[in-house]
Amino acid sequence: MKEKLKAIREEAVSKILESENLDKLNEIRVAYLGKKGQLTEVLKGMKDVAPEDRPKVGQMVNETRTAIEEKMEEVKNNLAAKAREAKLKAEVIDVTLPAKKNKIGHLHPNTVALEELEKIFVGLGYEVVEGPEVEYDYYNFEALNIPANHPAKDEQDTFYINRNMVLRTQTSSVQVHVMENEKPPIRIISPGRVFRSDEVDATHSPSFHQVEGLVIDKNVTFADLKGTLQEFAKELFGADTKVKFRPHHFPFTEPSAEMDVTCFKCGGKGCRFCKGEGWIEILGCGMVHPHVLEMSGIDPEEYTGFAFGVGLERIALLKYEIDDMRLLYENDDRFLSQF
Ligand SMILES: [Zn+2]
């Protein structure tokens, strides 16, 4: 019996030492210590042992069991330590590696220009109003005094949704909505996307942005228009900027003008940037046509007003000295990240 127990103990210990994982250890536990394990079988054979020897044999069986269990615990702890070490090794962090950089975006030059422009006019007491991009023919043309036979209404210039609706060709359409819904005094700017049936080139795009301005009140004169836009130009291009108004024609204003600013590069002396002119054309403006006021329910005998329209891209191109408008729409990160 003693020999048998010794053999079981040695066999079990050597198997335990050879086991490479916890599953294997468990198999060994079942094989030796389990209900049908070898050691249990020995205990079952106790009935054949002489009664006076039983306590001795019992003690030997217990010793064997304890020895196997202790060995098993020891190997189990070793295996666990090894597994932990392997895991730590696999998860090691190399602090000398360069960090992953998060790419932080920034505002598009158009947005920067728009925010600056809005800031100037909000500072002058204007409200920012937006209007629909898909517009009735009435608001885009008719209510702005643009007659049915005007060339701007041609399908070559305008995207038609159907006979009565267009993609707005100008933000001036917002003027009409505001005049219909609000009572003077009115002082708004309306930025937004407009659409023309243009081929894409360095200065044209089928979609671009305008900022419309409208002021209506009692006794508003061309002097107010001039003062306001002069202030705007100084804020935008610098305190030394001078402005110049040239007579022009727009159907919805009378009189109408185009405004030039002195070249902010050469101060008006003439340079490559302003093509030697010293002046740069910047916006269209004029006194709101009495007929336009009347159509929107405002009495032109009581109220007068002025309006202006600025091309937002034009401002962005000038401000950042970009020579091709297409660059603003190509979403090329190498270009956009410069601003
Ligand atoms: Zn110049």
Image (cartoon, grey):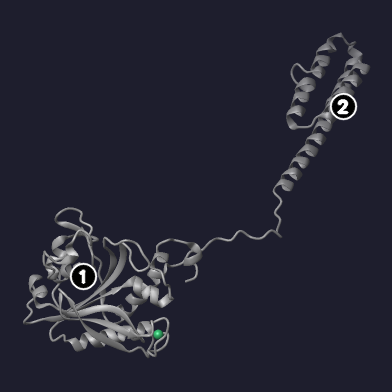
Quarter of the figure with residue 286: bottom left
* Pointer 2 local density, CA inside 10 Å: few below 14, some 14–19, many at least 20: few
41 relative position to 318: left or right: right
What residue is disc 2 on?
Answer: 14
Q: Amino acid at mark 2?
A: Ser
Dividing the image into four quarters, tell me where ligand 1 lies. bottom left
Label 2 beta carbon within 8 A of ligand 1: no
For residue 264, say whether it is visible: no
Q: How many marks?
A: 2
What residue is disc 1 on?
Answer: 172
Q: Amino acid at mark 1?
A: Ser
- Which residue appears at 31% of the width and 79% of the height? 282
- Labels 2 and 1: the sequence-earlier one: 2
User: Where residue 234 sits: x, y (%)?
Assistant: 34, 86
Residue 82's tag is none
- Which residue appears at 19% of the width and 67% of the height? 173
